[in-house]
């Protein structure tokens, strides 16, 4: 699970309500990896912002990002391997590189985009599936 602070939850709910619950309208305006943090700036596709200061900034750990890359099988492919001692061939997932190293060194710009979109999708899915927004109150109600 992705760790989401209460303040971030409120900002994400505000963004979701702003886009009329049409998650396809939420886009990543920009991104940055700095140290152990992946920063995503989110905006509404129908209301593009003039600067990143106007976008919703989300800071996520690279560890969480790596888990998403692995779960989506982005840094690996289906292939065949030969057992080192018994010399038989079997099908397996072949890892291209460690998740973050794959993202930074091996992934094409399109694959990097897929990884960031998978992170956003996982974040929104977790938020929506674990909580319900109560419009009459300022907080989030747990289900």
Image (cartoon, rainbow, N blue to C red):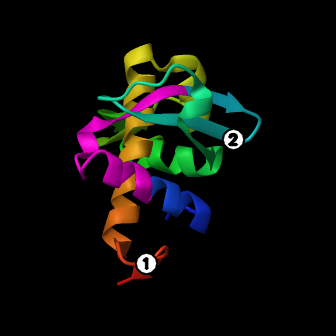
Which residue is more in the foreground, 22 or 93?
22
Q: Residue 93's quadrant in the figure?
A: top left
Residue 9, percent across and down? 51, 62
Would you name the residue on which mark 2 appears? 37
Q: Earlier in the sequence, mark 2 or mark 1?
A: 2
**Which span is picked out in magenta?**
13-30
Q: Residues within 10 Å of mark 1 (few under 14, many from 20)?
A: few
Would you name the residue on which mark 1 appears? 137
Q: Residue at x 49, y 65 (%)?
A: 1
Separation of marks 2 and 1 at Cα, in angstroms? 32 Å
Are discs 2 and 1 less than 8 Å apart at CB?
Answer: no
Q: Is residue 29 magenta?
A: yes
Vertical position of residue 132 compared to residue 80: above or below:
below
Residue 30 appears in view: yes
Quarter of the figure that contains the C terminus: bottom left
Which residue is more in the foreground, 124 or 79?
124
Q: Residue at x 53, y 34 (%)?
A: 55
Q: Secondary structure at mark 2?
A: strand
Q: Residue 98's quadrant in the figure?
A: top right
Q: Residue at x 30, y 33 (%)?
A: 79
Q: Residue 62's quadrant in the figure?
A: top right
Q: Is residue 102 magenta?
A: no
Q: Is residue 56 left or right of residue 94?
A: right
Residue 74 appears in view: no
Residue 45, percent across and down? 32, 29
Vertical position of residue 79 compared to residue 134: above or below:
above
Q: Residue furthest right?
A: 35
Residue 110, percent across and down? 37, 18
User: From the viewer's perspective, is the residue at label 2 or at label 1 nearer?
Assistant: 1
Residue 122, percent across and down? 39, 52
Q: Which mark is residue 123?
A: none
């Amino acid at each position: 699970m992705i760790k989401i602070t209460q303040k971030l939850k409120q900002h994400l709910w505000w963004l979701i309500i702003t886009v009329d619950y049409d998650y396809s309208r939420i886009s990543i305006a920009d991104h940055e990896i700095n140290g152990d943090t992946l920063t995503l700036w989110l905006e509404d596709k129908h209301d593009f912002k003039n600067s990143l200061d106007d976008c919703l900034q989300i800071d996520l750990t690279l560890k969480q990002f790596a888990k998403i890359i692995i779960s989506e099988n982005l840094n690996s492919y289906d292939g065949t391997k030969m057992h080192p001692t018994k010399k038989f061939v079997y099908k397996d997932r072949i890892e291209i590189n460690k998740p973050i190293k794959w993202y930074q060194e091996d992934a094409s710009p399109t694959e990097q985009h897929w990884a960031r979109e998978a992170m956003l999708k996982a974040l929104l899915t977790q938020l929506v599936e674990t909580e319900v927004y109560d419009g009459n109150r300022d907080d989030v109600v747990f289900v």
